[in-house]
Amino acid sequence: MRSSKAIPQTLQRSRTLRSLNRGLVKEQLVLFGTAKPKVINVSSVPQRSLFRYPGGKTWLIPYVRQWLNACNSQNKELIEPFAGGGIVSLTAVAEKRVRRALMVELDEDVSAVWKTLLSDDANWLAGKIIAFPVTKANVELVLSKSPSSLKEKAFAVLLKNRMSHGGILANGAGLLKHGENGKGLLSRWYPETLRDRIIDLQNYKADLNFIHGNGLQILKENIHRTDTLFFIDPPYTVAGRRLYRYSEVDHAELFRIASKLQGSFLITYDNADEIRELASSNGFQIAEIPMKGTQHTEKTELVIGRDLSWLKVI
């Protein structure tokens, strides 16, 4: 079993998990002493992504900043192999915490949005969002047609994302009916806000790159780089199938690759026994961070890394 760096005595406890094929392992759970971390109020974090992305990590941004600071990240590249809504890459670049960021996404619909936002068609997309008259008939018409161009596809994807329950893009997701405060489809459609985020993105998009591809393959290709950081947020074991079109991930392979990465990495996952065991068997440290789900119920998610001694209560 791979040995990990030491954790301060006040932050560490070990407990024995079930017997694995590789033998009896010990979970290295990082604690916060007597303090209990609070649920992050996402309204306190700059909203940069256009997506209402299920599993989005806006709530984790204050901890991501801690990690980047500990890594002296300003002259390094950040790779986000499961980009989704891309809030970590957007924040890291906009706040000049990294030299540049590479976002990778397998879903062709999500990819269409990022390709458009990082191209000369971004202004067209902003104008289309502002001009679109929101009615159920208009929304259904756009979503029923095959888009004629990448930018038209990007608009349709954003429209579906903002108008569907929970921002779910997977097949079968239904449109909002009542929405927030009974506003229906308009409850998640803020055209001026979305336009402003597109305009703001133009200020730092030169430091953003995007690849439509397989995140695991990109990790393998960059395994020996020491000038690179990796924020790894794959589809989760429990809810992934319901939320994402491409939800199947070889979690054991992901951890095997992570164990060989030369650069620092931060992995986030649902609080599942399978994931805790994979982290422990690779000698990684685990922390439980509270967050609020889409139903406003509090739960914990896992933050995983080689060394989480930088983690402080917020």
Image (spheres, rainbow, N blue to C red):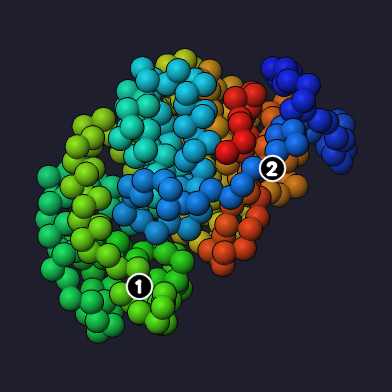
Q: Say the numbered circle drawn on residue 199.
A: none
| Residue 233 at x, y percent in the picture | 52, 42
Q: Which residue is drawn at 28% across and 82% down?
A: 136
Write down the residue under mark 1.
Answer: 187
Rounded to the nearest angstrom, the CA distance separating label 2 from label 1 is: 34 Å
Q: Quadrant of residue 210?
A: top left
Looking at the image, can residue 206 be seen? Answer: yes
Where on the picture, by quarter, is residue 87?
top left
Taking the image as shown, residue 154 lies to the left or right of residue 126, namely right
Q: Which residue is drawn at 18% across and 41% down?
A: 202
Asked if residue 48 is positioned above or below residue 259 in the image, the reply reads: below
**In the depicted structure, whether residue 79 falls above or below residue 114:** above
What SS does tag 1 mark? helix
Residue 116: in sight, yes or no? Answer: no
**Element type at marker 2?**
loop
Give the residue drawn at x 40%, y 28%.
Answer: 78
Q: Which residue is the extreme one toward the front?
A: 34
Q: Is residue 312 left or right of residue 15?
A: left
Q: Which quadrant of the figure contains the N terminus?
A: top right
Residue for badge 2:
36
Mark 1 residue type:
Ser
